[in-house]
Image (spheres, helix red, strand yellow):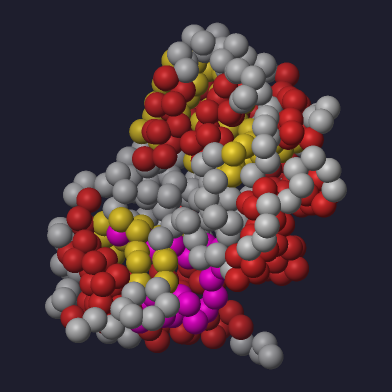
Amino acid sequence: MSLANGRAYLAIPGPSVMPDAVLQAMHRPSPNIYEGELHDLTYSLFPDLKSIAGTAHNVAIYIGNGHAAWEAALANVLNRGDTVLVLATGRFCVGWGEMATGLGVNVQTIDYGDKDSVDLDQLATTLRADTDHKIKAVLAVHVDTSTSVKNDVPGMRHVLDMVEHPALLMVDCIASFGCDRFEMDAWGVDVMVTACQKGLMTPAGISFVYFNEKANAARGDCVTGYWDWRPRINPEVYYMNFYGTAPTHHLYGLRAALDMILAEGIEAVWARHATLAQAVWAAFDVWSVPGGIGLNIADPEHRSHAVTSCFAESPEGDRLRNWCEHQAGLTLGIGLGRTPADAYFRIGHMGHVNAHMIMGVLGTIEAGLKALDIPHGDGALSAAATVIAKATRGGA
């Protein structure tokens, strides 16, 4: 017997749950790509994308996943033979650095492991030692989806300014955008990359590169016609927004998703994600006992509000994840890039999520712990409910 029949819940850290409004907006015939409604809708997206990112600068849309945005960002600002500094706090910043290597860029990496955030003092020491300013860009991940660590992006800008280093600050916000607070201009970020399938609640397939005038002036020789962001932000004709046919149905879905975010208000969206993440952490604080499960990131200040990386004794992480999916209809994320992989799993709490969904995730995990005889403390659901009750006390 299985209790998984019924509507499944995809609680992986992207693609995230898609709202009915997004799906309905996309359920339509192909539009005229040459004039009319699609053009108006497309140009309505840019100011709202900028507003959510907290920038008055530029954003280009690419048809591709987050890796496409990585390459576009690198190609537009770097020359072959340039050096970048990669601040690795998990699999994804390492991957961005590997892509830079493939473009003929020299990569210098500081690896902080899988459980720690960027050490700003070490960053300052490294940048001070670069007296010839060979480092052209610092690559960092705001939230690494594999580890769920959240890095101090404003702190990185402070370090760059303090040591008077001219390197571009380039930040991956693929996991965090629309979930964890991010303010591009106020935080001094030169280039930011993100994608549509997480906090933006749209099916995977489009990504975004944000950049300021300093980054735009750093034109490198890695860029080719398709990746060049300059025609995309000043298109002579509509198709240059995408260097070809528009991702038509994604644009309709994205418009609906942005409308939902703006109606709620970005501050309220960030607050909702913070409360739901804290509910998850409260449950794990109670569950965590020797030989049981626990949180990957010890310091709450460095935990993401979008994704939580968890561990158990090997192979209990995989056993619990498989039980949740096949016995209860809840899909959790795999231990991506972790060793041993069967000890780790991840919970996505990003985008279109609310209190009853998160309580359902936690209740299902607790049922799995009991069914599999994995050691755990009692009272986790009560602890999570208390977080939610406290955040909403007095609300109608």
Question: Residue 95 in the image: x percent, y percent?
Answer: 40, 33
The answer, for residue 372, to whether it is visible in the render is: yes
Count of marks overlaid on the render? 0
Up-down: is 317 above or below 78?
below
Could you say which is closer to the camera, residue 126 or residue 195? 195
Counting from the top left corner in percent of width and height, residue 388 is at 52, 81
Q: Residue at x 55, y 9 (%)?
A: 132
Q: Residue at x 54, y 46 (%)?
A: 205
Which residue is depicted at the point 46% across and 23% down? 100
Q: Position of residue 201 (x, y in %)?
A: 58, 59
Q: Position of residue 378 (x, y in %)?
A: 27, 84
The one of 351 and 301 positioned closer to us in this rendering: 351
Q: Nearer the viewer, residue 29 or 124?
A: 29
The residue nearer to you, when weighing 395 against 368, is: 368
In the image, is residue 233 above or below residue 336?
A: above
Q: Quadrant of the N terminus?
A: bottom left
Q: Is residue 218 magenta?
A: no
- Residue depicted at x 45% and y 13%: 104
Residues drawn in magenta = 345-363
Q: Is residue 157 visible?
A: no
Judge from the rendering whether residue 308 lies leftward or rightward of residue 163; answer left or right: left
Residue 361 is one of the magenta-drawn residues: yes
Q: Quadrant of the C terminus?
A: bottom right
Please tell me in which quadrant of the rendered image residue 190 appears: top right
Left or right of 295 on screen, residue 354: right
